[in-house]
Image (cartoon, grey):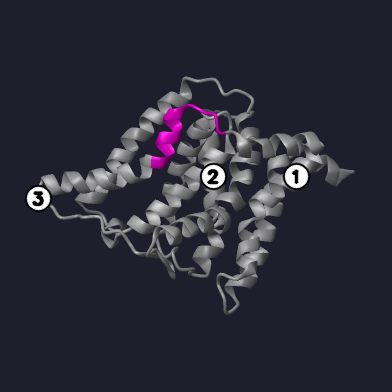
């Protein structure tokens, strides 16, 4: 009875404990074995969404599951946000490079022809890689949890900005094993990763709230952002220079407008 009472009164905490526990167990097995990208890494990556389905079923039954999964099919949304998710990451990467070229500083963006060991040498391989990112790279495995389960519950208690910051911290903390085991792609400053993740969490909340709670749009945006950052990442983005100053400056200006827009709208029950 005590456990049931705790589960009902602390839904987010209970969900996070189980999500972190199983993710870290699976990742611990994966990252101490020969193959870093084996089935246990994939299993761990799916725990946020898997636990979201399990906990939604427990709390809200079949109706809750139906409501959660229906968010994966919401595609009739404000066209602005469809354009936004497809172009925003690319624009924020290329405009600073363009400004640098105007003032005579060379920070040209070179497109990588591979992601990890996956060669991007034809339209078909690019498409396959993109869908692999959707399924195995985090978006599908995470978003039913972070945006589908946690965000709506947080926004019932606190405003969208605070909800986003909390999710950003949770989202970052969930990735701690990646840093502990020095997984390729996570050889960056943890603080930088935290700030970047909070930044993305705020934008994701803004998009989610303005697209009727569409997890389809969120998963697409998550995938596009991961894909564009992977193919456009250049070494000079890791250090402070004119390019990164312009990059972060522009993103922060846009973030201010996004926060202002979030603050003036009432969050509907999504």
- Precedes in sequence: disc 2 or disc 1: 1
**Relative to 58, is 132 on the left or the right?**
left
Q: Are marks 2 and 1 in contact (CB under 8 Å)?
A: no
Q: Quadrant of the C terminus?
A: top right
Secondary structure of residue under mark 3: loop
Q: Residue under label 3, please give it.
A: 104
- Label 1 Cα neighbours within 10 Å, binned few <14 / some 14-19 / many ≥20: many
- For the point 72% across and 46% down, the residue is 53
Looking at the image, the residue that sits furthest to the left is 104
Q: Total number of numbered labels?
A: 3
Q: Quadrant of residue 209?
A: top right
Residue 229: x and y in percent read 38, 53
Looking at the image, the residue that sits furthest to the bottom is 34
- Give the residues in magenta: 75-86
- Label 3 Cα neighbours within 10 Å, binned few <14 / some 14-19 / many ≥20: few
> Relative to 63, does residue 50 appear above or below in the rendering?
below
Q: Residue under label 1, please give it.
A: 55
In this rendered view, identify the residue nearer to me: 44 or 69: 69
Q: What secondary structure characterizes most of the magenta part?
A: helix
**Relative to 46, is 57 on the left or the right?**
right
- Work out how far the residue at label 2 is from the one at label 1, CA to CA, in angstroms: 20 Å
- For the point 59% across and 40% down, the residue is 147
> Relative to 9, does residue 242 appear above or below in the rendering?
below
Secondary structure of residue under mark 2: helix
**Relative to 33, is 113 on the left or the right?**
left
Q: Residue under label 2, please give it.
A: 219
- Precedes in sequence: disc 3 or disc 2: 3
């Amino acid at each position: 009875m005590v456990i049931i009472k705790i589960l009902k009164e602390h839904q987010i905490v209970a969900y996070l404990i189980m999500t972190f526990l199983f993710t870290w167990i699976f990742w611990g097995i994966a990252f101490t074995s020969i193959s870093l990208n084996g089935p246990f890494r994939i299993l761990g990556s799916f725990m946020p969404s898997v636990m979201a389905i399990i906990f939604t079923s427990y709390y809200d039954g079949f109706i809750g599951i139906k409501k959660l999964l229906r968010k994966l099919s919401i595609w009739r949304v404000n066209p602005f946000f469809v354009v936004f998710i497809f172009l925003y990451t690319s624009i924020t990467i290329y405009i600073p490079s363009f400004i640098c070229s105007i003032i005579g500083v060379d920070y040209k963006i070179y497109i990588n022809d591979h992601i990890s060991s996956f060669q991007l040498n034809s339209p078909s391989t690019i498409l396959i890689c993109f869908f692999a990112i959707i399924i195995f790279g985090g978006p599908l495995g995470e978003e039913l949890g972070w945006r589908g389960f946690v965000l709506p519950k947080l926004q019932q208690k606190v405003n969208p900005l605070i909800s986003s910051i909390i999710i950003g911290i949770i989202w970052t903390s969930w990735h701690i094993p990646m840093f502990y085991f020095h997984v390729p792609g996570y050889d960056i400053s943890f603080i930088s990763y935290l700030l970047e993740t909070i930044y993305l969490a705020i934008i994701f909340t803004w998009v989610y709230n303005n697209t009727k709670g569409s997890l389809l749009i969120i998963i697409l945006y998550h995938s596009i952002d991961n894909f564009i950052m992977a193919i456009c990442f250049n070494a000079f983005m890791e250090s402070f220079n004119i390019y990164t100053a312009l990059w972060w400056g522009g993103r922060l200006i846009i973030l201010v407008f996004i926060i202002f827009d979030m603050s003036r709208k009432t969050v509907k029950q999504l």
